[in-house]
Image (cartoon, grey):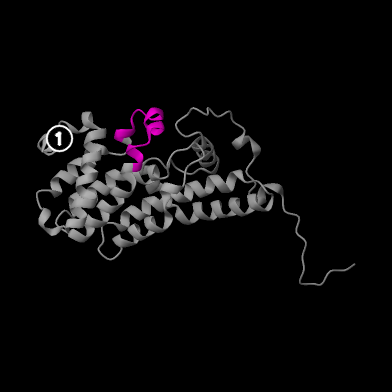
Amino acid sequence: MDLPPFIRIVDFPVEDFRIVPDSVFSVTIDREAPDPFEVLVQRLCNYLGIPDLNTRSGLKKVHARFDEINHSLNAHFNTALAIDDPRPPLSICFIWSRWLFSHLVKLLGDENTGNLVVIFLDWFKPDDVMHASGIPLEFEIARYNSQIASVLRKHRRNGKIVGYALRVLAHTMPVVLAADDLWAARPNLANEIAVTEVVSAILNIFKHPTHLSNDILQLSLVPLLRSCVSTCREQCKELPGVIPFFTS
């Protein structure tokens, strides 16, 4: 039967469908690893030529090639769904979440957009979501604590921005600090979540506390500082002002 002229059948080669080969995910994973799921994500990133998402320099490279990389991820995502392969879509969602959190942190330094981050966290409720390995999703946000601490230092006299940043820290840090399995799996966790930088930035805020509301002081700042210092005493004991606070 002849087809109408507006219908064309095109025989695409397999590689044009952006199918991720089984070899990318055919790897023996150590289930005791800090985050076994991340092994799969890293292999997909290597296969697609995506820079390291765990470093600031890698994220900058990703942002510089955003359109190209995002187009590739969308193509692989849709193709994998079409052939009922759940592994690429799950891994790609993880990659997108890294991008999301890296951009969210940038919003904190602006009075008009900082509150969007707080609203997002209230809506998203990451404390109810776990990685496949049982790692709380708050850890993904806590990876950017160094940038959040930088926001606190830069805007320490701006009550609105400080309040936004402290709410984010108060939302994520208690969960991460209390995650015993996470500490056992990642001995360097205190450095990964920049505890020393966070505590130093918070102590600096105490030099100009008058612009903060009592709610921020009582519900976010003081409890956050107390939990950081009590959990990571070794990392914090050399910081000026910690001992007077801890003994007060």
- Main SS category, magenta section: helix
In magenta segment, residue 209: no
Magenta segment range?
A: 175-191
Picture residue at 25% right of the left edge, 39% below the top? 227
**Where is residue 195 shown, x and y percent of the image?**
26, 38
Answer yes or no: is residue 92 visible.
yes
Picture residue at 35% right of the left edge, 27% below the top? 187
**Where is residue 23 shown, x and y percent of the image?**
63, 35
Q: Nearer the viewer, residue 45 or 95?
A: 95
**Where is residue 218 shown, x and y percent of the image?**
19, 51
Q: Nearer the viewer, residue 95 or 59?
A: 95
Please give the residue where the numbered disc 1 appears in the rendered image. Answer: 239
Picture residue at 75% right of the left edge, 59% below the top? 10
**Where is residue 114 shown, x and y percent of the image?**
29, 60
Residue 159 picture quarter: bottom left
In magenta segment, residue 184: yes
Q: Secondary structure at mark 1?
A: loop
Answer yes or no: is residue 64 visible.
no
Q: Amino acid at mark 1?
A: Leu
Q: Nearer the viewer, residue 199 or 15?
A: 199
